């Protein structure tokens, strides 16, 4: 649920679908951001080819990780259905923009939905939840 506080800041109050917190990285902080001009001239192209050969094991590892991620995406609907059907406890979180600000256990599907609406209403009134997640 998306809501704005009285200062105009956008908040999102949602269920966390996986049992761990997502790690979001800001733009420009990736491991290959310093290689923007590599390959513009012949010497740089040779350096890029050598680095590509050295990076080949990591590329293969990335392919395995991508395969595991696709497998997770295939299994996620069944896991979510099982959580809803068997009454597993959900964690809800409030994000300020895209930064997680607050999270708490909320109970089953119905209870977590009610808690999401309550927290969103509090944020809209200006009563912000205390920060429970470190930066």
Image (cartoon, grey):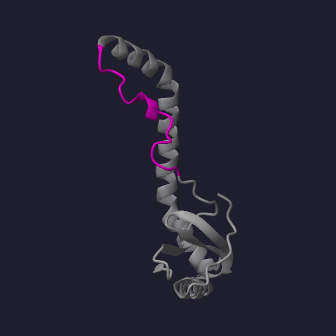
Q: Residue at x 34, y 16 (%)?
A: 45
Residue 85 falls in image quadrant: bottom right
Report if residue 13 is visible in the image: yes
Give the main secondary structure of the magenta stretch.
Answer: loop
Q: Residue at x 59, y 82 (%)?
A: 109
Residue 116 falls in image quadrant: bottom right
Residue 5 percent across, percent down from the top left: 50, 80
Residue 124 percent across, percent down from the top left: 52, 85
Left or right: 38 in relation to 17: left
Across the whole image, how many numbered discs are drawn on residues?
A: 0
- Magenta stretch, residue numbers: 25-41
Q: Is residue 39 above or below residue 1?
A: above
Q: Is residue 66 above or below residue 13?
A: above
Q: Residue at x 49, y 37 (%)?
A: 62
Residue 69 percent across, percent down from the top left: 50, 49
- Foreground of the two, 74 or 5: 5
Judge whether residue 37 is colored magenta: yes
Q: Is residue 71 above or below residue 54?
A: below
Judge whether residue 17 is colored magenta: no
Q: Residue at x 68, y 60 (%)?
A: 134
- Foreground of the two, 64 or 126: 126
- Foreground of the two, 43 or 58: 43
């Amino acid at each position: 649920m998306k809501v704005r506080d009285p200062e105009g800041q956008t908040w999102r109050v949602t269920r966390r679908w996986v049992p761990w917190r997502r790690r979001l990285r800001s733009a420009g902080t990736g491991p290959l951001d310093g290689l923007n001009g590599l390959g513009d001239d012949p010497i740089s192209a040779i350096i890029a080819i050598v680095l590509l050969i050295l990076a080949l094991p990591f590329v293969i590892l990335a392919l395995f990780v991508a395969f595991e991620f696709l497998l997770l995406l295939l299994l996620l609907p069944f896991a979510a259905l099982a959580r809803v059907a068997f009454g597993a406890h959900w964690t809800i979180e409030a994000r300020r923009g895209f930064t997680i600000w607050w999270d708490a256990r909320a109970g089953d599907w119905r209870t977590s939905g009610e808690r999401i609406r309550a927290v969103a209403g509090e944020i809209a009134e200006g009563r912000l939840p205390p920060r429970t997640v470190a930066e």
